[in-house]
Image: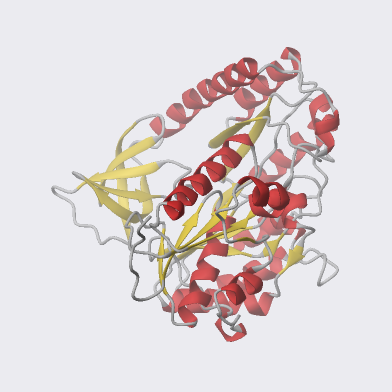
C-alpha cells in the first residue's frame, strides 16, 4: 500500500487520562522541541508522521479508551498514514507485555518513568537544562504543577502504585523555579497535583513539608491563585489550613477524596481513617478556614458494599453539604488488594448508586448556588463561548467544577484576567452574573 511522503518529522502527542498525565506530556513536548522536533498536541490533523500516545490505565473505562486509541492509530499506520507509533504512560507500564503481543504495529512501548528511553528512540537527548521550562498545553493563564510522583498508600482498589511506583517528592527549589518560569509566561493560577499531596516531603525531607512549599510558591510574583488537589484525609497536616488562612494566594479550596463514610467500607478500602475521625477533620477544616470549598470524590460498588453502607454514605453527603462532589464506580483491577475479593456488586447497582448520589449532590449544589445570588466574587475568565464569557471563582477548578457565565453584550472582560462579578442568577452547576 502506498504511504504518505513526509519531508520532515512531525510528532503528535496524544494525552489520555488525568492532569498528571497531561504534565508528563507537556514535559515530553518540551524535550522534543528542545531537540528541534516539530510537535503538536492532541491534533486532529493528519500531517504528523510520528504519533506518541500517553495512556491511562486507572479504571476499565480509561483502559478501554486507551486501547481504542492505540488500535485507531495502529490502523492508520497500517494504511500508511503515519510512519512511527509509540505508546507510553500508565497502561503501557502495566500491560506492556500483553500489548506488545496484541498490537504489534506499535514500534515501542514505554513505562511512566521511561521518557529518556523514549527520547533516545527518536534520537533525541534528555536535556536536564529544560527542567522547569515546561511548555503548557492548557490555556495560557493556568497550569498544573505536579509536586510528586507515585503513591505509597495501600488503598485496596487503587492500581496507581503499580503503575507509578512509590511516592517521590520533587525538591522545593525545583518547584519554585518551575513556578517562576510559568509566571514569566503569563500563568496566574497553579493547580498543585499529586497522587497524594499531604505526603509531600516525607521521603526527601523526613517530614511533611507541604506548608513550607505553599509559602514558597505564594512568594512567586505573578501567581495569584494556588489550589490544592488530591489531599489524603488520614493524618492530614493541619498546618496547611494555617497557610491557606494566612496567604491570600492559596485558594479557599481543597480537593480531598474521601471515597466512603461507613466504617465497614473505610476498613475494606484500607483508608486508614474512621468515620468519626473524618467528621472531626471536616469540622476542623471548616472552623479554621470559614467559607472553604470542599471538593471530594466517592467510590461506589466496592466489594462488600451493602445497601446499608451506601445509605450511610448518602446521609453523610446530605449532612456535610459538600460544595463539589465526584463519583466513580468501582473497577475490579488486577493485582490490587480488592481483586482477591468477589466483585459482588452488580454493574447496574453500581450505576444506580452513582446516579442516586449525584442526584443528592445536584440538589445541594443548586441550593448553594442560589445562596450566591447578589454576592460579588473575584472571577478568572477562561474563554468565550457564544454569547457568554466563561470564568471561575476561587472555589472552582477548570473542567471539573462550576463556572460563571457573563453575557458578552454589556460587559467588558479580558480573557485570562480577573474581574469582580455580581451573581444575578444560578443553576445547579452554573452561575450567571455581570461585571461590577
- Rendered location of residue 286, percent (x, y): 64, 43
User: Does the image show residue 128?
Assistant: yes
Q: Residue at x 41, y 65 (%)?
A: 49
In the rendered view, would you say 217 is above or below 435?
A: below
Horizontal relation, residue 244 to residue 49: left or right = right
Image quadrant holding the N terminus, namely: bottom left
- Rendered location of residue 152, percent (x, y): 81, 54
Q: As rendered, which of 83 and 414 lies closer to the eye?
A: 83
Q: Residue at x 65, y 53 (%)?
A: 92
Q: As rendered, which of 373 and 206 lies closer to the eye?
A: 206
Horizontal relation, residue 139 to residue 72: left or right = left
Q: As rendered, which of 108 and 324 lies closer to the eye?
A: 108
Which residue is at the far bottom? Answer: 129
- Rendered location of residue 403, percent (x, y): 38, 43
Which residue is at the far top? Answer: 307
In the rendered view, would you say 34 is above or below 73?
A: below
Amino acid at each position: 500500500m502506498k504511504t504518505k511522503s513526509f519531508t520532515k518529522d512531525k510528532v503528535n502527542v496524544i494525552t489520555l487520562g488525568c492532569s498528571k498525565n497531561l504534565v508528563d506530556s507537556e514535559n515530553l513536548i518540551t524535550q522534543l522541541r528542545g531537540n528541534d522536533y516539530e510537535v503538536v498536541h492532541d491534533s486532529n490533523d493528519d500531517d504528523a508522521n510520528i504519533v506518541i500516545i500517553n495512556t491511562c490505565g486507572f479504571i476499565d473505562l480509561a483502559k478501554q479508551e486507551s486501547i481504542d486509541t492505540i488500535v485507531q492509530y495502529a490502523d492508520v499506520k497500517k494504511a500508511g498514514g503515519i510512519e512511527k507509533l509509540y505508546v507510553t504512560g500508565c497502561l503501557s507500564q502495566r500491560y506492556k507485555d500483553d500489548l506488545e503481543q496484541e498490537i504489534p504495529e506499535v514500534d515501542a512501548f514505554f513505562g511512566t518513568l521511561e521518557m529518556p528511553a523514549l527520547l533516545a528512540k527518536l534520537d533525541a537527548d534528555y536535556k536536564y537544562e529544560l527542567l522547569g521550562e515546561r511548555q503548557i498545553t492548557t490555556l495560557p493563564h493556568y497550569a498544573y504543577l505536579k509536586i510528586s510522583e507515585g503513591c505509597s498508600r495501600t488503598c485496596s482498589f487503587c492500581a496507581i502504585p503499580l503503575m507509578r511506583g512509590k511516592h517521590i517528592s520533587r525538591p522545593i527549589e525545583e518547584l519554585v523555579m518551575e513556578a517562576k518560569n510559568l509566571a514569566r509566561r503569563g500563568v496566574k493560577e497553579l493547580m498543585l497535583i499529586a497522587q497524594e499531596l499531604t505526603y509531600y516531603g516525607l521521603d526527601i525531607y523526613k517530614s511533611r513539608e507541604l506548608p513550607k512549599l505553599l509559602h514558597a510558591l505564594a512568594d512567586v510574583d505573578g501567581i495569584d491563585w494556588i489550589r490544592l488537589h488530591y489531599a489524603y484525609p488520614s493524618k492530614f497536616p493541619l498546618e496547611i489550613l494555617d497557610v491557606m488562612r494566612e496567604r491570600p494566594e492559596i485558594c479557599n479550596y481543597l480537593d480531598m477524596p474521601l471515597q466512603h463514610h461507613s466504617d465497614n467500607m473505610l476498613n475494606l478500602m484500607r483508608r486508614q481513617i474512621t468515620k468519626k475521625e473524618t467528621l472531626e477533620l471536616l469540622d476542623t477544616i471548616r472552623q479554621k478556614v470559614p467559607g472553604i470549598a470542599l471538593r471530594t470524590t466517592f467510590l461506589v460498588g466496592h466489594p462488600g458494599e451493602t445497601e446499608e453502607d451506601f445509605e450511610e454514605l448518602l446521609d453523610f453527603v446530605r449532612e456535610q453539604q459538600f460544595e463539589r462532589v465526584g463519583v466513580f464506580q468501582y473497577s475490579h483491577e488486577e493485582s490490587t488488594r480488592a481483586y482477591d475479593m468477589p466483585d459482588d456488586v452488580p454493574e447496574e447497582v453500581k450505576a444506580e448508586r452513582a446516579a442516586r448520589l449525584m442526584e443528592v449532590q445536584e440538589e445541594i449544589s443548586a441550593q448553594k448556588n442560589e445562596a450566591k445570588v447578589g454576592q460579588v466574587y473575584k472571577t478568572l475568565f477562561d474563554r468565550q463561548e457564544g454569547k457568554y464569557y466563561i470564568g471561575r471563582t476561587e472555589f472552582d477548578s477548570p473542567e471539573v467544577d462550576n463556572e460563571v457565565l457573563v453575557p458578552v453584550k454589556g460587559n467588558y472582560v479580558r480573557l485570562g484576567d480577573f474581574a469582580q462579578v455580581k451573581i444575578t442568577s444560578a443553576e445547579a452547576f452554573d452561575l450567571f452574573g455581570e461585571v461590577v
